[in-house]
């Protein structure tokens, strides 16, 4: 097994439909600018509320990607 180094960042995805869609949106957006994404871990879920109603689901996702010199 070769030695590797990975960096971990947090991103927040949003969706008006579900937490699952919010997490998927976060990964899809990050994958446009980050290479070699390896692991995604949902670390926090919350909702945006307006006038007593849920208007958005938010998922904080920790993403790891391979570090290249």
Image (cartoon, rainbow, N blue to C red):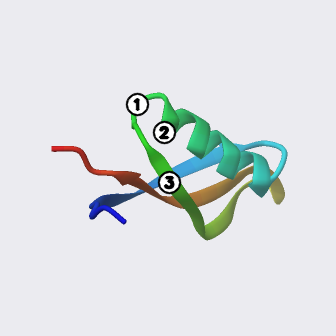
The residue at 29%/60% (across/down) is 4
Q: Looking at this rendering, what residue extends furthest in the left direction? A: 69
* Residue at position x 65%, y 40% in the image: 25
Secondary structure beneath label 1? loop
Nearer-the-camera pick, 20 or 40: 40
Q: Is residue 18 left or right of residue 5?
A: right
Residue occupied by mark 3: 38
- Is mark 1 in CB contact (under 8 Å) with mark 2? yes
| In the rendered image, the vertical position of residue 30 relative to residue 66, given as above or below | above
Q: Give the labeled residue for mark 2.
A: 30
Residue at mark 1 to residue at mark 3: CA–CA distance: 14 Å
The residue tagged 1 is 33
Residue 11 in the image, given as x and y percentages of width and height? 47, 52
Q: How many numbered tags mark residues here?
A: 3
Name the quarter where the N terminus is drawn: bottom left
Say above or below: 46 vs 33. Answer: below
Q: Given the current orientation, which residue lies at the most extreme bottom position?
A: 43
| Residue 47: quadrant of the picture | bottom right
In this view, 67 is above or below 44: above
Residue at x-position 66% and y-position 67%: 45
Q: Which of marks 1 and 3 is in front?
A: 3
Q: Distance of mark 3 from mark 2, alpha carbons?
A: 12 Å
Label 2 near label 3: C-beta < 8 Å?
no
**Residue farthest along the top direction in this orientation:** 32
- Quarter containing the C terminus: top left
> Can residue 64 be seen from the camera position used here?
yes
**Judging from the image, what secondary structure is the residue with disc 3 in?**
strand
Camera-nearest residue between 56 and 20: 20
Q: Which of marks 3 and 2 is nearer the N terminus?
A: 2
In the rendered image, residue 37, in percent from the top left (x then y), is placed at: 47, 47
């Amino acid at each position: 097994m070769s030695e590797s180094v990975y960096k971990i960042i947090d991103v927040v995805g949003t969706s008006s439909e579900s937490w699952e869609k919010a997490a998927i949106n976060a990964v899809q957006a990050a994958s446009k600018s980050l290479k070699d994404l390896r692991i995604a871990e949902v670390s926090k879920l919350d909702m945006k509320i307006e006038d007593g109603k849920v208007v958005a689901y938010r998922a904080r996702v920790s993403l790891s990607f391979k570090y290249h010199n």
